[in-house]
Image (cartoon, rainbow, N blue to C red):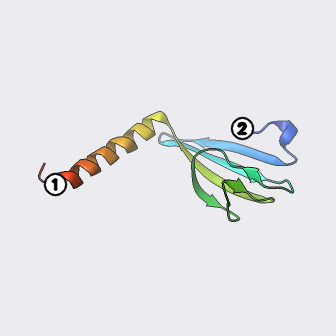
């Protein structure tokens, strides 16, 4: 669990950890929008505007591990190199 028991009436957040990264699930049970944590928004039950999750909604956010991020960056560098010089 990422959220504290004191916040459970309004906010529940937990993470699912895998080898490529972490997915944080955020449930906003309050009556107001909240700021989402950093990461790539995968899915939200309501539209997210300006990085804020509306009241009574949920979001799934990808947060890559340093190893997963490094692998993605390596793949991106290889892709750019292939585009710049496809004869390599």
Q: Which mark is residue 21?
A: none
Seen from the viewer's position, the closer of residues 44 and 51 is 51
Quadrant location of the N terminus?
Answer: top right
| Residue with the most extreme left position | 87
- Badge 1: few (under 14), some or many (20 or more) residues near its Cα, within 10 Å? few
Residue highlighted by disc 2 = 2
- Res 43 → quadrant: bottom right
Position of 13 with respect to 31 (left or right) is left
10 on left or right of 17: right
Q: Residue at x 60, y 50 (%)?
A: 61
Q: Nearer the viewer, mark 1 or mark 2?
A: 1
Between 81 and 26, the one lying in front of the other is: 81
Q: Residues within 10 Å of mark 2 (few under 14, many from 20)?
A: few
Residue drawn at 23 percent across, 55 percent down: 83
Q: Which residue is mark 1?
A: 86
How many labels sit on residues? 2
The image position of residue 41, as x and y in percent, is 59, 54
Mark 1 touching mark 2, by CB under 8 A?
A: no
- Residue 81 spot, x, y in % from top left: 23, 48
Q: Please name whichever residue, 28 or 85, is drawn nearer the observer in this view of the structure.
A: 85
Q: Which of disc 2 and disc 1 is earlier in sequence?
A: 2
Kind of element beneath mark 2:
loop
Q: Position of residue 71 (x, y in %)?
A: 38, 40
Secondary element type, mark 1: loop
Give residue 87's position: percent from left, percent from top.
11, 53
* Rendered position, 67 above or below 36: above
* Up-down relation of residue 15 to residue 51 (above or below): above
- Kindly give the residue lying farthest to the front in the view shown: 50
Residue 14 lies in quadrant: top right
């Amino acid at each position: 669990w990422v959220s504290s028991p004191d916040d459970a009436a309004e906010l529940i957040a937990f993470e699912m950890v895998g080898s490529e990264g972490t997915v944080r699930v955020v449930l906003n049970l309050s009556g107001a929008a909240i700021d989402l944590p950093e990461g790539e928004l995968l899915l939200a039950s309501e539209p997210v505007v300006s990085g804020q999750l509306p009241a009574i909604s949920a979001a799934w956010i990808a947060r890559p591990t340093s190893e997963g991020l490094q692998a993605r960056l390596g793949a991106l560098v290889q892709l750019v190199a292939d585009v710049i010089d496809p004869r390599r």
